[in-house]
Image (cartoon, coloured by chain):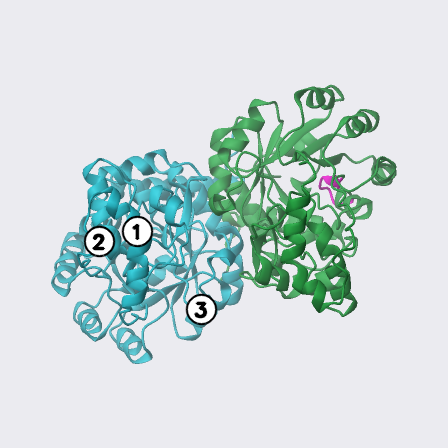
Chain colours: A green, B cyan
Amino acid sequence: MWPDNRITSLFNIEHPIMLAPMAGPGGAELASSVAQGGGLASLPCAMLSVERIRKDVSIIRGNRGTPINLNFFCHMPEPADAERDAQWKSRLSEYYVEFGLDSDKPVDAVNRAPFDEKMCSLVEELGPEVVSFHFGLPDESLLQRVRNAGCKIIASATMAMEAKYLADRGCDAIIAQGAEAGGHRGMFLTDNVASQAGTMALVPQVVDAVPVPVIAAGGISDARGIAAAFALGASAVQIGTAYLLCPEANVPEMHRDALRNAKDDETALTNVFSGRPARGIINRVMREVGPISSDTPAFPTAGGALAPLKAAAEALGKSDFTSLWSGQAAGLAREMPAQQLTETLANEAQALLKRLGGKKKRKW
Amino acid sequence: MWPDNRITSLFNIEHPIMLAPMAGPGGAELASSVAQGGGLASLPCAMLSVERIRKDVSIIRGNRGTPINLNFFCHMPEPADAERDAQWKSRLSEYYVEFGLDSDKPVDAVNRAPFDEKMCSLVEELGPEVVSFHFGLPDESLLQRVRNAGCKIIASATMAMEAKYLADRGCDAIIAQGAEAGGHRGMFLTDNVASQAGTMALVPQVVDAVPVPVIAAGGISDARGIAAAFALGASAVQIGTAYLLCPEANVPEMHRDALRNAKDDETALTNVFSGRPARGIINRVMREVGPISSDTPAFPTAGGALAPLKAAAEALGKSDFTSLWSGQAAGLAREMPAQQLTETLANEAQALLKRLGGKKKRKW
């Protein structure tokens, strides 16, 4: 059926399509729908409580006992730094004035927690088929417990060196995240976004660097991207942006509108929303403060001081301070339920692969 | 033979592989060898005299009367700006001191001329099968003369909007240049390099935007990239970096060594060598002055003040001030004559396309 079945076998899924875990947009409903379409259901856990994860996993499994991927962040939380926080507040002060907001009011904490003892116990309790990590890997002791729980372990690499690092530590597969990808870069051995390779260059170099199967991510929003990923040597794809327009995604209308209109050259990598570089559709705060600012505090706290501005602007119908995460191929996304999208992408990609092999001539 | 023969028919070539015109490394010898391998011979003319072009074309055609592509720049030369030149000299002054060079000595002019009346007459005289433009298109009157000379006209686009602009003006095919590509960005409707899409995202969006065939460029250095480009909807590929290690390329040993060792994350876009953004392997001047500097004078003059530093450093065996142009997939390049490389890439890509289509199962 597919040119390479290493990932479908490893995860026990029908189609080599993995839903990108997107903290915020992604929840039980989106994951369930992808699973029903034959793809891998991913649940982004970085912003969820133990209770919420437990409930979501039971919803996703409720349907047909489909495999599930729980995704966690592995950033090293930095100690509070009042000086950097003040510097960031000061950089944003003109906007606080513009919206008549009190910049002395303390900002809310941002809840993006790294994988820890508590979450590791939850993984042991729930036994998800797959656990994926972003921003590196957790401590070896935690990683060993995840392995002992019978979970397949995968993680994101943005360059061959990171892929090798992950494979050397026992990852069962590597997500090669190209520069096109929306949201946060998974990079952890570098912070140089200027040198991150695009998917076309990255995937074959990662494939050559590691003995385990590779999942291509970044700029893949339709069957052409899926077929191209297999050509590059990938064994599966991870798709995010294309799922954001599905009715099951928790994406506000403002963000959906931006995605519907986004052209190929209208995204950029920015650190203004979280303190770490992530790709989103260019808006006012990215243009005026970023896209990369040296004033942001450490991940994930930058969003705290932005929150009041976001709320005030959104109340006026403006997405000027809202993170509009998107990869570079939003223009290829189609609006349909996630199950249907997964099946459609799989069918179209298989047909395209056959056409490319000369089984059926393409007519011009 | 190939899933799409629009470009091979248009250019009357055997394989849908076009040598990227690389001013400096590319000359008659490299182009001839690619042509003998069945690809499209491209001669970069921006740095060549009329006499040199005439001679090179006769060498390339001498073999088997193979089709030829003459490539020209279409930048709008900016008037001399003594203040910006002085600013740039001042930015580089510490290096002049380090190498004991006289920074008051006038710098040599940089010879990258845009397509003009003189070159247009030469095109009419030589009648190349294909003329390609970088940085937009020439004036409509010149363009019409090229068309009347019977040449197919192609040009580079870095986003769908540029592709549409070029197709609307009668281009017969569009080169979609993804962010992975080495050397100068072809961008002409924007100067925002931060938003240039990667090949994976760019190609299908360009294919959807224009009615003419698309040539994929950027990060394609082996058969996997070629097959992927066809999957994305391209009708051919343009390959540059992979040809730089061929013995026929005019590439100094220092540059070859850098290419042999370049990892996927070791290039960046820089404007320090010419004043326009171009991708090269990161070296000292890129790290310390760039990669993007606001002090550079207009294209192509930035290289003038760098030339004495380049010469002094190279005399010490260092490439600290040398432009080491490269795309993001130098690591996939193999060292062999260009004819053999072209044939090998074509054969391997065809075999891979067949395998992807299920004609022959890949063994794991």
Q: Which numbered disc, 1 or 2, marks the residue that appears first in the sequence?
A: 1
The amino acid at mark 1 is Leu
Question: What numbered label is drawn on residue B92?
Answer: 1
- Mark 1 — on which chain does it sit? B
The amino acid at mark 3 is Leu
Q: Secondary structure at mark 3?
A: loop
Q: Which numbered disc, 2 or 3, marks the residue that appears first in the sequence?
A: 2
Q: How many neighbours does mark 1 have within 10 angstroms: few (below 14), some (14-19), or many (20 or more)?
A: some
Q: Which of the two residues, A326 or B89, is positioned nearer the viewer here?
A: B89
Q: Quadrant of residue A308?
A: bottom right
Looking at the rendering, the stretch of residues picked out in magenta corresponds to: A36-44
Q: Quadrant of residue B335?
A: top left
Tell me: residue B173, above or below residue B96.
Answer: below
Circles 2 and 3: CB distance less than 8 Å? no
Q: From the viewer's perspective, is the residue at label 1 or at label 3 nearer? A: 1
Q: Which residue is mark 3?
A: B189
Q: How many neighbours does mark 2 have within 10 angstroms: few (below 14), some (14-19), or many (20 or more)?
A: some
- Mark 2 — on which chain does it sit? B
Q: Position of residue A194 (x, y in %)?
A: 48, 47
Q: Which residue is mark 2?
A: B103
Q: Report, in whole angstroms, how far the alpha carbon at label 1 lies from the one at label 3.
A: 30 Å
Q: Which of the two residues, B243 or B214, is positioned nearer the viewer here?
A: B243
Q: Position of residue B233 (x, y in %)?
A: 50, 56
Residue B86 appears left or right of B62: right
